[in-house]
Amino acid sequence: MLRAIPAIAILAATIIAGAALLPGSSRAETPGATKSFDEARGTLPWPVEGVQILGFGESAAVGRLSRGMAIRARAGAQVVSPCDGLVVFADEFRTYGRLVIISAGDGYQFLLAGLSTIEAKVGQQVSAGELIGTLGYGAPLTLELHKDQQPIDPAPWLRKS
């Protein structure tokens, strides 16, 4: 029996292949970084001011668990990078809609989906708190964190509010 390959697996493979072609594709993905991403736990800014409406591993749909968190915010809210890193994807992508992926180094990538506008460009170095896009009316921001292409709970990495 054939199983469909999840869209995120295809995306991750594409990003990894593309990131390998970018200058400084390993630890140097974030020039000037003096500590590992692991040390950033609990210190990263929330990407948007809003209310978390779905957490990691919670039921997102019938038979499907959330691979990240959903944050409801006002229409037009600015979405910022939760970390220093390299923008490796910034475009429409299947069920994610407008999506920005930021490589934070050490095998970590943030996915920010459901954007109305994208301000970041592929290959751009961004700093934590830097504008990457805005939200539209009604759609929550989807935030995922992946470590070596596996989704992990992003909440422990964000500052407590």
Image (cartoon, rainbow, N blue to C red):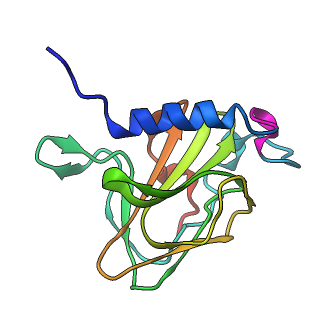
Q: Nearer the viewer, residue 60 or 41?
A: 60
Q: Nearer the viewer, residue 65 or 131?
A: 131
Q: Residue, x 67% and y 70% (percent of image)?
A: 129
Q: Nearer the viewer, residue 142 or 7?
A: 7
Q: Nearer the viewer, residue 51 or 89?
A: 89
Q: Residue, x 31% and y 34% (percent of image)?
A: 6
**Image quadrant in which the N terminus is located:** top left
Whole-percent x, y for residue 30 in the image: 78, 47
Whole-percent x, y for residue 102 in the image: 61, 51
User: Tag count in the figure?
Assistant: 0
Q: Look at the image and say whether residue 69 sits in the magenta stretch.
A: no
State which region is magenta: 24-29
Residue furthest top as drawn? 1
Q: Using the image, determine if residue 73 lies above or below residue 90.
A: below
| 111 left or right of 70 in image | right
Q: Using the image, determine if residue 70 lies above or below residue 72.
A: above
| 5 left or right of 124 in image | left
Q: Residue, x 55% and y 30% (percent of image)?
A: 148
Q: Residue, x 68% and y 70% (percent of image)?
A: 130
Whole-percent x, y for residue 33 in the image: 84, 47
